[in-house]
Image (cartoon, coloured by chain):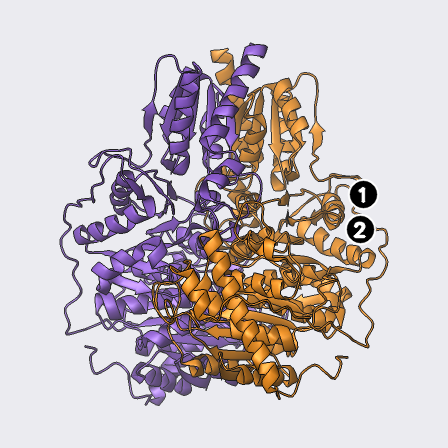
Chain colours: A purple, B orange
């Protein structure tokens, strides 16, 4: 447990106050200076929170900067990521970065980016899209309480403007419900957003009423009164629930050129030297941040075991979502760091199988996809490997969180079920038809779309050993098992399902369209058109060699996808053949807005069923015969 | 104003109660029957809200089903869109659809889709992604209060599960703050979500505490007690703020096979006939819904005027975001139905210019992008044309709302500024690098990316006359004006900026890369490489004719985009040449994760600046010389 020295009583000596005051001024000076050197940045948003952070750094944060990997370290998240100058000034005061490095703020190649990214000791995640830091903090606090079972604290510096984001209220709700007493939100209520006053200005009672309703302990203070700040932290750490400190501050505090004025957001000061003089001039306070010292042993993951995927018999009908659910149960037996996250669709996505077998590693977020993804970001900071499932369509709700997770180089496995028109009668609101485009356009992402149960189970294991944002697209409907259990499927690979030396055309498919393509190839063979069929289950990265070989061999590639024409399988194939164009490419995809209908009717209406594929090929062959 | 008959006192006669009971049972019977015929759907979620809707339909809703376009009609939104059987049963009881049509529920070609879409009288928007109906309702109520200035009411039927979505809390917050007293949220607290119990079950006091904190009037009732329901509506309509009715109900109410049981979500009943018998058998109640009758005249839009775009002088440096802001001011003078929506970035996006000139049509949503897009959906229902601006990156926060708006065939113009690495030092969290991919993959969308101020101003006017989801991508940095004021730019067009009969290569660019491409072409000409340059400002739809012509003429297309390689300009070009491959395509795009740096350094690091473009072309030409 925490050493007795923590959670100080709130009694600060005059000397301590004076030192804190000096540190706070230094944090301000450094914030002002580094934004001037950079020629851009947010000094005024840093100035407002300097006192709050000075007290935290000296008296409450527990962090071993000589060992940032120490599992007992606290976590500090700047949800208001634009206050990065303040964060970097703190790191400098703590000796974690040098003066010289601080001067590289926002320069090409510097670790000190305009908004924080996790290249620095004490920075775990990327922020800069407002409303994300607190939900990520909820993920860390959940991990500390329920997975790591360590008493580290999570401190989140929030802006007042970002309290307008719904994701913040998902976070307040989830943390309050889960009683995350090691989580503290420090809200820098500086009254001014980017373009003018916030909705409630300094009326912190408005925030208090709302936040307290979600089960939090709330504290209102003057955010420039060091003793009030100290008392607030002491009270927050003593509370038996998450605590929010609503600190009334002045944007640009300490510098008369900008203090409490509109139109001063996100700009260096005009007269930096005068501002620094006003702040008391350069200081050289260095402090020793308290190191964590617990009696409890740190969490240790169990040993990795060999993953034994469930086995499915060829010819059986199994939905890939079901194979995912069953395989995840097995994967989690072999990988003790796998956790499962649900947004109240576990019965449909089959995440519920995991919940039943591994309840201690299962997390229910109800219908709050943003909080689910943010929590995953927090969990993976601590070495856990999150698998998150919802409908493919509903990851669009958390797209900004996925984008930011990629910027923070987070590792997580997203599993989107009910993709495409093949879901049938529920209609377009439930169909993931843009998921491949959206997830392909995430930096460093992996996008997989298996067509059978054994392939799904095999790929799930491959994902566990890979980094970055990974996306597995599964299907609602059953489809025949076409691969043997034990078949290997590597990410970046493909599977040639039919091929001959006489192939005149290649069908490139994934998921449900693989089965349609196989049936179409049968029909075309009866017409004397030898047809190659390739299962491109790995949409990103894609097996360029096999695609190019097929292009050279057959001169015609037909891509078939249960997805809009933009940004999916077809575009990925085109990207491969773009440079030398060894073949023409015909893209079959969903072009009209679907309504309700049976799965078979939907595939037919979209022109991606077996009959439509065969017809498209025949039409192409007769064109070629005429022109050739 | 409302006729005195509305906002009834809550005194219901025995006869009226008996009629209401009969209607409620009929709504249940029809819900059960149509899901049985369809073989899918959500009867239990419909049964719970039948009493609530029966009382609303008979005694409170004001809607002229003989004239769905009547501007005085109330609005009813099923935020819990899966209860569509109940909605359709209501329409049948009101005589708006026939028995026969009700039997087409979820069938191919039917207007009665699995989740509501706006093909039906009384249905204005698409729902089915939970958490969207209430924020859309906020948009309608805002419109009634501040734009139309008509006293129509907006009624939103919500589920209890969807209260977990942050977007609902953006809606509660915005409506409470704006005092939208004509908005009523009816929350069907049936205690069971899709996969099991909700977080708070029937503890409606938990919801009340939270919702009331956001400035709403709240009412807790037994949602099956017709008199309590009637009293609640009377109280809600009399309240001087938005009202939420928290109605405790039983999922599957009235049918013992499923009532209050887990595992009964989204499935037809097993024994429909028995259920119908238990519900009292088929009824044939038809009702006459009260028609609106106001004394106030309906809102009339002013006459359309000719749009006179602002003029910029060739050679001046102007940011396209600035041209957007200035042009929108002018457009709004000519088009009285244009409204402007901001999410607290108006100073950066330049939406603030509109706010200053047209304050009565300007709406501030603070940092709540989901609510902003949802409000736009509501506004366009009433004939207003919303222009919404935020950073290109932050539309990702509302991607699910944009997706759903397209399903509902909504018309709106999204304007995303600060796109791409060219923003410079703020870093990747602020750069829209996936926006083209995401917005291209929206059904029926238009995606535009101008490179100069006159082009921006011209395109803004074109957008005003077009339907669907439109996206205009603008830039932070200044760039030289290269077009004359008065030049015409059609959507689906392009502009050939350099061309000769000897062109050996074509550079295809948009936005900032147009200027880089022009400079690269100068350098290449010095090397004796004649280079065509095309400004592909219309990314969707794209000018296929000009692209194909360039492919045929030059044999080599180089696409250059300040965007990830996936799903953007390059993929759109590839889609055009896929079928006959008249040229090779070289895609230049942002491939590595940027950090902070100056705009010029960013473009160079990404390999999309003038030097990199010229180098890529030279490299290609020498390859071609060797191989050819």
What mark, if any, has residue A117 been given in the picture?
none
Q: Residues within 10 Å of mark 2 (few under 14, many from 20)?
A: many
- The percent position of residue B185, horizontal first and vertical second, equals 56, 74
Viewer-proximal residue, A91 or B82? B82
B352 with respect to A29 (left or right): right
Q: Which residue does the numbered mark 1 point to in the structure image?
A: B485
- The percent position of residue B292, horizontal first and vertical second, equals 74, 72
B129 with respect to A178 (left or right): right
Q: Residues within 10 Å of mark 1 (few under 14, many from 20)?
A: some
Chain letter of mark 2 equals B
Q: Residue B257 is drawn in which quadrant? A: bottom left
Please check whether the numbered discs 2 and 1 fall on a single chain.
Answer: yes
Secondary structure beneath disc 2? Answer: loop
Q: Quadrant of the C terminus of chain A?
A: top right
Viewer-proximal residue, B200 or B18? B18
Residues at marks 2 and 1 touching, judged by CB atoms closer than 8 Å: yes
What mark, if any, has residue B310 been given in the picture?
2
- The percent position of residue B38, horizontal first and vertical second, equals 48, 52
| Up/down of A179 relative to B78, above or below | below
Disc 2 or 1, which lies upstream in sequence?
Answer: 2
Q: Quadrant of the N terminus of chain A?
A: bottom left
> Can residue A384 be seen in the rendering of this structure?
no
- Identified at 74% across, 62% down, the residue is B66
Chain letter of mark 1 equals B
Viewer-proximal residue, A296 or A377? A377
Secondary structure beneath disc 1? Answer: loop
Count of numbered circles in the view:
2
| Up/down of B502 relative to A122, above or below | above
| Up/down of B332 relative to A141, above or below | above
């Amino acid at each position: 447990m925490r050493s007795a020295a923590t959670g100080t009583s709130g009694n600060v000596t005059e000397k301590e106050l004076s030192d804190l005051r000096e540190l706070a001024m230094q944090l301000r000076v450094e914030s002002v200076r580094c934004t001037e050197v950079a020629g851009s940045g947010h000094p005024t948003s840093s100035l407002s929170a300097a006192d709050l952070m000075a007290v935290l750094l000296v008296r409450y944060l527990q962090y071993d900067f000589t060992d940032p990997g120490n599992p007992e370290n606290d976590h500090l998240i700047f949800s208001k990521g634009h206050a990065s100058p303040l964060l970097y000034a703190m790191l400098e005061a703590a000796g974690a970065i040098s003066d010289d490095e601080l001067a590289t703020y926002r320069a090409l190649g510097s670790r000190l980016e305009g908004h924080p990214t996790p290249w620095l000791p004490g920075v775990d995640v990327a922020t800069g899209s407002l409303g994300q830091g607190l939900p990520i903090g909820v993920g860390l606090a959940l991990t500390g309480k329920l997975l790591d079972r360590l008493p580290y604290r999570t401190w989140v510096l929030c802006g007042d403007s970002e309290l307008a984001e719904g994701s913040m209220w998902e976070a307040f709700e989830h943390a309050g419900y889960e009683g995350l007493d090691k989580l503290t939100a420090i809200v820098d209520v500086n009254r001014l957003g980017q373009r003018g006053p916030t909705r409630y200005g300094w009326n912190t009672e408005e925030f208090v009423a709302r936040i307290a309703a979600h089960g939090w302990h709330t504290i209102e203070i003057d955010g420039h009164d060091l003793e009030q700040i100290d008392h607030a932290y002491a009270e927050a750490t003593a509370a038996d629930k998450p605590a929010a400190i609503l600190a009334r501050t002045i944007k640009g505090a300490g510098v008369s050129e900008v203090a409490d004025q509109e139109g001063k957001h996100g700009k260096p000061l005009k007269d930096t030297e005068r501002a620094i003089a006003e702040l008391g001039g350069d200081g050289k306070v260095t402090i020793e941040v308290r190191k964590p010292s617990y009696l409890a042993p740190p969490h240790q993951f169990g040993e990795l075991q060999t993953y034994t995927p469930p086995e499915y018999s060829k010819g059986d009908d199994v939905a890939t979502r079901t194979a995912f659910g069953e395989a995840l149960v097995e994967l989690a037996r072999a990988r003790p760091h796998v956790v499962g996250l649900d947004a109240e669709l576990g019965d449909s996505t089959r995440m519920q199988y995991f919940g039943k077998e591994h309840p201690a590693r299962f997390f229910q977020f109800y219908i709050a996809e943003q909080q689910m993804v943010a929590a995953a970001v927090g969990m993976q900071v601590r070495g856990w490997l999150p698998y998150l499932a919802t409908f493919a369509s509903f990851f669009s709700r958390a797209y900004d969180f996925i984008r930011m997770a990629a910027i923070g180089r987070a590792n997580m496995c997203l599993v989107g079920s009910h993709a495409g028109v093949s879901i049938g009668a529920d209609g377009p609101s439930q169909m993931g038809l843009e998921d491949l485009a959206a997830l392909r356009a995430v930096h460093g992402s992996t996008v997989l779309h298996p067509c059978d149960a054994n392939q799904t189970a095999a790929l799930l294991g491959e994902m566990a050993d890979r980094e970055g944002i990974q996306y597995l697209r599964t299907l609602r409907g059953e489809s025949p098992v076409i691969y043997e259990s034990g078949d290997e499927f590597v990410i970046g690979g493909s599977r040639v399902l039919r091929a001959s030396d006489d192939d005149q055309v290649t069908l490139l498919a994934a998921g449900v369209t693989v089965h349609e393509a196989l049936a179409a190839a049968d029909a075309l063979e009866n017409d004397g058109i030898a047809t190659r069929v390739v299962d491109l289950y790995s949409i990103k990265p894609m097996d360029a060699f096999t695609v190019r070989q097929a292009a050279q061999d057959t001169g015609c590639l037909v891509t078939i996808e249960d997805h809009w024409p933009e940004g999916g399988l077809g575009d990925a194939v085109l990207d491969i053949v773009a440079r030398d164009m060894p073949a023409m490419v015909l893209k079959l995809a969903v072009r009209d807005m679907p309504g309700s209908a049976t799965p078979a009717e939907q595939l037919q209406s979209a022109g991606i069923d077996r009959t439509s594929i065969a017809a498209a090929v025949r039409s192409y062959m007769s064109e070629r015969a005429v022109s050739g």
